[in-house]
């Protein structure tokens, strides 16, 4: 945590006219929160990327997340970068260092600025928006222009921050060369010169004693993976055998398709941008019919067009994996913000009754392993499997030790058919042998109408009832290997906090700050069907509190429907932003009284 401010006698600032203290303005010992703010198109993501990568390579734990408006240019966007001696995986409200790149940037994050926040930036940008005494003028534009133009501001700023945090300049330069390896040598040299100037400013600031940063580096972190939710989910799909993706662009899910397209040749994946979401889901179903492992990736508005195709998968008992990157609705809503608002939509979508599985990753590791597991479950049980993420989880970065792509073996479940093959043979378990066209002598017949065991249309009402029962029987099999909820905290708790999906790290860190021995956290990675142990956890608690990023406690409704249990208290947020750790800790504290 940041320490207090030390104010003593003043001396003139070598970087500008403003007088500053000759003692440390702020001392950072374990954790520092940096916010970059500016307009879309100014390259804030470039600064974030260069900074987080080089910090990780230097041995620091890092976390970053973004919030941005739905526009290509202009507006106000901000990126939070947490750097710590210990593992960090959640956003905080606290701003220790703020760099505004354009006018309006300070106002955009005004409510998070405290008396301890230090601003680094250009006087012309800051002077009309900030009246505090913790401003250090840095002529970013001037330095960038001397190098070659405003485009080099990003390298100056990233290098300045890296220098303040003790990143060796050679490490930064090596990564900068790697980052711009696709550019010509002149561009690389100019960026290196910009970085040199940023490091010079950081050296002056550290020598003056105005900032003291004492974060500990961890050698083991240098070899860890710095990854975001998009990359983890896409790699998990690859590890799960995904070899076909169909989609129509819709944020935040588009990034998954972009990533898989970039590696499609290397991993033998067909990536198809369909003309619309209706075509996309039907293509994915067709891929499974042909023996591939298909993924349809979309967001809530796009999934609305996929619902008829979902029912088709339910009727023909086709495996299917659907990724929904949730964002606020209804309609277009807030297309670049986050929300857990589509759980009930995914659960109840489609006409008729058929089984499905809903997975909700809570961590970046979960994004990988649950995506991998989704393909295995879909193939084995011949049902649609949903992966519910959201903008916040997909676009958050932090370092993790490793991932194991071999955790689940890829075992395709289709069979070689024989003459007289019955695609929908009635069995005790509800599972019929799944054949694919051309593999064996049997004819593989499917139809969207109700059908007999061979797959031909029927209106035999007794057979109809048997087929419905057959499909629903699969739920009994699915329940035998569901992903159990994770309990964090003491077994003998009085208060139980409930959460699902992307709230995992937020709730975990917020509870840790409360330091209450009788509070535990139960996190659900599979939100439907519910694990059989769920009711046992709920009954043990004297008080239950659920935390969700939506307006109606959607998972609370699922719990009530599946178990009859009513949660005592709801903590909900639905303004398009995730909870912060401090905000959630305060809300939880008030919920206990």
Image (cartoon, helix red, strand yellow):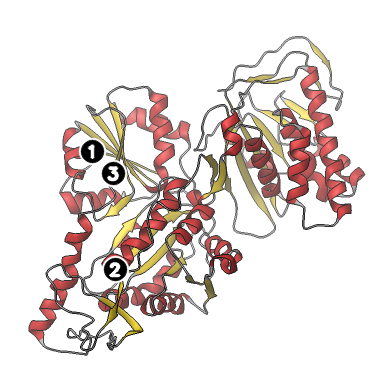
Looking at marks 1 and 3 on the same chain, the residue that comes earlier in the sequence is marked by 3
- Identified at 48% across, 37% down, the residue is 580
Mark 1 crowdedness (10 Å alpha carbons): few <14, some 14-19, many ≥20: few
Residue picked out by circle 3: 485
Q: Is residue 121 in view from this perspective?
A: no
Mark 3 crowdedness (10 Å alpha carbons): few <14, some 14-19, many ≥20: many
The reply, left or right, for residue 259 in relation to residue 497 is: right
Of the pair 430 and 494, the residue shown nearer to us: 430
Mark 2 crowdedness (10 Å alpha carbons): few <14, some 14-19, many ≥20: many
Quarter of the figure that contains the C terminus: top left
Q: Residue furthest top?
A: 9
Q: Which mark is residue 239?
A: none
Quarter of the figure that contains the N terminus: top right
**Label 3 residue SS:** loop
Looking at marks 3 and 2 on the same chain, the residue that comes earlier in the sequence is marked by 2
Q: Position of residue 301 (x, y in %)?
A: 44, 67
* Mark whose residue sits in front, 1 or 2: 2
Q: Which mark is residue 568?
A: 1
Between the residue at mark 1 and the residue at mark 2, the CA separation in whole angstroms equals 34 Å
Q: Position of residue 258 (x, y in %)?
A: 58, 64
Q: Which mark is residue 383?
A: 2
User: Looking at the picture, does residue 372 appear above or below residue 473?
Assistant: above
Q: Position of residue 216 (x, y in %)?
A: 61, 23
Of the pair 226 and 582, the residue shown nearer to us: 226
**Label 2 residue SS:** loop
**Label 1 residue SS:** loop
User: Looking at the picture, does residue 267 appear above or below residue 118?
Assistant: below
Q: Position of residue 186 (x, y in %)?
A: 89, 53
Between the residue at mark 3 and the residue at mark 2, the CA separation in whole angstroms equals 22 Å
Q: Are marks 3 and 2 in contact (CB under 8 Å)?
A: no
Q: Is residue 63 in view from this perspective?
A: yes
The reply, left or right, for residue 204 in relation to residue 353 is: right
């Amino acid at each position: 945590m940041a320490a207090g401010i030390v104010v003593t006698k003043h001396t003139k600032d070598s970087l500008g006219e403003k007088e500053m203290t000759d003692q440390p303005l702020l001392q950072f010992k374990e954790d520092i929160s940096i916010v970059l703010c500016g307009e879309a198109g100014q390259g804030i993501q470039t600064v974030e990327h260069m900074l987080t990568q080089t910090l990780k390579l230097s041995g620091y734990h890092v976390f970053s997340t973004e919030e941005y408006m739905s526009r290509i240019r202009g507006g106000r966007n901000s990126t939070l970068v947490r750097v710590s001696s210990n593992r960090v995986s959640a956003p905080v409200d606290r701003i220790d260092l703020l760099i505004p790149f354009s006018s309006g940037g300070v106002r955009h994050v005004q409510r998070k600025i405290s008396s301890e926040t230090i601003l680094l930036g250009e006087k012309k940008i800051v002077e009309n928006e900030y009246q505090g005494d913790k401003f250090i003028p840095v002529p970013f534009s001037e330095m960038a222009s001397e190098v070659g133009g405003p485009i080099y501001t990003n390298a100056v700023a990233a290098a300045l921050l890296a220098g303040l945090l003790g990143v060796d300049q050679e490490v930064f330069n090596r990564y900068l060369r790697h980052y711009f390896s696709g550019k010509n040598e002149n561009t690389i040299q100019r960026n290196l010169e910009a970085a040199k100037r940023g490091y010079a400013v950081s050296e002056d600031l550290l020598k003056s004693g105005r900032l003291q940063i004492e974060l500990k580096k961890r050698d083991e972190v240098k070899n860890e993976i710095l990854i975001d939710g998009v990359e983890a989910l896409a790699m998990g799909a690859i590890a799960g055998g995904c070899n076909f993706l169909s989609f129509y662009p819709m944020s935040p899910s588009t990034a998954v398709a972009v990533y898989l397209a970039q590696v499609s040749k290397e991993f033998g994946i067909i990536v198809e941008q369909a003309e619309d979401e209706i075509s996309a889901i039907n293509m994915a179903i067709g891929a499974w019919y042909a023996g591939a492992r298909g993924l349809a990736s979309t967001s809530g508005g796009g999934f609305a067009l996929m619902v008829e195709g979902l029912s088709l998968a339910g009727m023909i008992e086709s495996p299917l994996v659907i990724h929904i990157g949730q964002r606020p609705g209804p309609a277009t809503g807030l297309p670049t913000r986050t929300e857990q608002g589509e759980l009930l939509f995914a659960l109840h979508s489609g006409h008729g009754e058929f089984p499905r599985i809903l997975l909700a990753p809570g961590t970046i590791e979960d994004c990988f392993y649950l995506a991998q597991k989704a393909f295995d479950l879909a193939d084995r049980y011949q049902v649609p499997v949903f992966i519910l993420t959201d903008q916040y989880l997909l676009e958050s970065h932090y370092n993790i030790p490793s991932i194991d792509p071999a955790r689940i073996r890829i075992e395709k479940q289709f069979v070689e058919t024989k003459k007289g093959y019955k695609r929908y043979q009635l069995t005790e378990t509800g599972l019929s042998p799944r054949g694919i066209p051309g593999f064996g002598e049997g004819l593989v017949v499917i139809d969207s109408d109700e059908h007999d065991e061979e797959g031909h249309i029927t209106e035999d009402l007794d057979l109809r009832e048997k087929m419905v029962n057959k499909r629903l029987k699969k739920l009994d099999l699915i329940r035998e290997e569901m992903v159990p909820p994770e309990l964090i905290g003491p077994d003998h708790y009085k208060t139980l906090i409930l959460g699902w999906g992307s709230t995992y790290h937020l709730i975990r860190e917020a509870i840790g700050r409360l330091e209450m021995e009788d509070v535990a956290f139960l996190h659900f990675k599979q939100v439907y069907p519910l694990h059989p142990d769920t009711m046992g956890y709920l009954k043990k608690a004297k008080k239950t509190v659920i935390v969700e990023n939506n307006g109606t406690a959607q998972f609370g409704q699922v719990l009530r429907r599946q178990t009859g249990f009513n949660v005592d208290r709801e903590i909900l947020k639905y303004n398009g932003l995730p909870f912060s750790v401090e905000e959630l800790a305060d809300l939880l504290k008030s919920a206990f009284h």
